[in-house]
Amino acid sequence: MSTTSPSILPTTDPASEALLSVRDLHVHFPTQDGLVKAVNGLTFDLERGKTLGIVGESGSGKSVSSMAIMGLHRGTNAKLSGEIVLDGVNLLDISAEEMRKKRGREVSMIFQDPLSAMHPYYTVGNQIAEAYRVHHDVSRKVAKQRAVEMLDRVGIPNPDKRVNDYPHQFSGGMRQRAMIAMGLINDPNLLIADEPTTALDVTVQAQILDLLQDLQREFNSAVIIITHDLGVVAEMADDVLVMYAGRAVEYGPCKEILTHPEMPYTWGLLSSVPDLTGDTDARLIPIPGNPPSLLNPPSGCAFHPRCPHREKVPGDLCRTELPMLVPGQRGPMHTKRCHLPNADAIYAAEVLPVIAPDLAEEL
Amino acid sequence: MLAYVIRRVFAGVIMLIVMSIVTFALFFASPIDQASFICGKNCSAAQKAQTAAAMGYDDSFANQWVDFAKGVVQGRDYPDDPELRKTAPETIVHCDAPCLGYSRERGDTVTNLIKDTFPVSFSLAISAFVLWIVGGVLLGVTAALKKGTIIDRGLVGLSLVAYAFPTFFVGLVLYKFVAIKWGLTDIPRYTSIAEGGVGGWLSSLTLPAITLAVFFMAAYVRMTRSYVIESFQEDYVRTARSKGLRERTVTFKHALRAALTPIVTMAGLDFAGLMGGAIITESVFNYPGMGKLAVRASSDFDLPTTVGLVVLLAAFVIVANIIVDLLYAVIDPRVRLG
């Protein structure tokens, strides 16, 4: 890895509005059993003030990609290639020290389980103030005052008292609020939320998502929200990136992806969402099989062993040839990685009537 | 907090009482007749009875224990005979409170025996403790931070070897080779601070302390290493990094703080256990400590000394336990005493 390059040179057109553009990102981990290809050629853009939802099951490469953006694979044996350009700077080219200075200030991250993500021996206020002091040359007192303000902003009651509490004295929802306060205290351009609501109960989930949206508007940050919950995506995201086996399999505007998905894996994700208004006897339809091994990914399309529609593709294409991420039938904004020629029609005819009969009738 | 300490001390005292009863009971159950053991082979029945009376062995088990407990609180006379006190007070041995008994074999009160041997054991334990904590934790942290490198492998391998060497072997090598054959140090002989000053005291402790520390240090290197490595896997370390903290801060403020907490517990208990557990080291270097006293007491069936040492060492362990628990509450805010 080149660490000497002092490149602050813009690698993309400065006129482009993208705050973050990831180009052909690969993250591979050499292990004793072989090379684990966690992320293979991921490409996406994110503009300021927008939200990207990254969806996929465990092991699809969601978290590994976001850790790559944070530069948290540095110091491990992970092999990274491609480009991660944030504000015109390729994060893979800069030195560890330059990356450290950006971490928490230009790009910050909130984690799934706020109890284990906070240090049990330090007060919440101490941990939030620490995030501020590392990037701002201020006294402890000023930093603590700032932590109180942030706790107040994220809706912690009595912030001037609670700032001295330890994480275990907070409830789960309050801990996640405190994590958000910690993530936003330096007003970062990019906030990565890695399954921010998974460990919380549903009512608190809604509050946290609302809070994130409010703060995003206030701070005008770009947000990447990583989740396996399509409900979260529908509420939060402008764009959706569906990942499978370390690759993007479908990418486009949120509404477009949720209403006209063209990749059978996305159909599977939609089918496994419970319908609150539906028949209580109706069964959820799980995706058959297990997530693929990243050591020996299936040949061709990685999803083919689990795909119920592979017979519809002529020849043995699904098994032999990796489909490219190309625009589908609905325009260049919506790309998919699938050999099915008439996916939209198959979805409307075969999938939609099963998962949402009332919607299908309207069409 | 205070209520907790009082409760713990109270429970500790009860534990000590139970331990002394058990030790008493073990000697009572043994096939050896204490009085004739002390009195010797050519002992007439009358002499034997006199010995038994002087030591209180003619009494019942319960009464003997009560006498012992009374002695701890208010002192005791051997033999406790008002008649003799008038006629021949010089034949009576008075044992001041806290009296842990009188050893006929040693010809002294147990309290005095302990007073003589305690400084030796304590000096040994504390110097070994400092060595092994500083060495073990530093090397363990180093190994963890250099995980997978030759330094790590070397340290782990070395500590495995050190862990496997028996203490008497390490002691003999240091004593016979380093001190006697190569003459690198003086031949170790215990020197108190009063005799040789702090310098003399420390240099007299060097070899035995190393002997004693090697085993523990090896154990602590491996333990510290695994705690630190585990701690670096924690989510909060990832959070600390993602805040943009310097790696030094991540290591020392976040990872090590959590990793070293369990070591406090281990260290406190190991130290207390070491007070009477340095038997082999004391024997190899012929240091007159409590470990040697304990060995002689048990091979001589010296009941008073044995009971006295058991109660004292148990008290150390109990006190160390209480201190460790209090310390834990200070270190880890999640621990609430109650």
Image: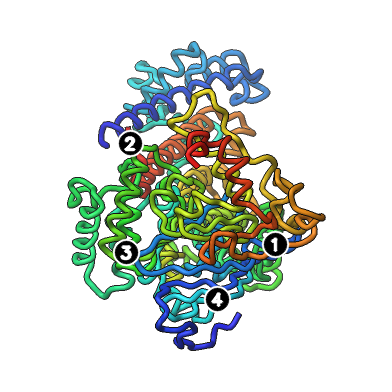
Q: Chain of mark 3?
A: A
- Count of marks, rendered view: 4
Q: Considering the numbered disc 4 on the image, is that residue within a helix, a strand or a loop?
A: strand
Which disc number belongs to residue A83? 4
Can you say which quadrant of the picture contains the N terminus of chain B? top left
Q: Sort mark 2 into few (<14), some (14-19) or many (20+) by Cα contacts within 10 Å.
A: few
Please, what is the three-letter code of the amino acid marked with disc 4?
Glu
Q: Position of residue B306 (x, y in %)?
A: 53, 32
Residue at 39% across, 23% down:
B69
Above or below, A173 relative to A239:
above
- Label 1 – label 4 distance at C-alpha: 22 Å
Q: Are dots 1 and 4 on a single chain?
A: yes
Which disc number belongs to residue A130? 3
- Label 1 – label 2 distance at C-alpha: 62 Å
Foreground residue, B55 or A327? A327
Res A100 → quadrant: bottom left
Please, what is the three-letter code of the amino acid marked with disc 1?
Pro
Foreground residue, A53 or B195? A53
Q: Is residue B102 visible?
A: yes
Left or right of residue A324: residue B118: left
Q: Which residue is mark 1?
A: A323
Q: Considering the numbered disc 3 on the image, is that residue within a helix, a strand or a loop?
A: helix
Q: Chain of mark 2?
A: B
Q: Considering the numbered disc 1 on the image, is that residue within a helix, a strand or a loop?
A: loop
- Label 2 – label 4 distance at C-alpha: 53 Å
Residue at 68% across, 56% down:
A341
Left or right of residue A134: residue A305: right
Foreground residue, A130 or B228? A130
Q: Position of residue B25 (x, y in %)?
A: 55, 19
Residue at 60% across, 13% down:
B45
Residues under numbered marks 1 and 2 in contact, where contact means CB atoms less than 8 Å apart: no
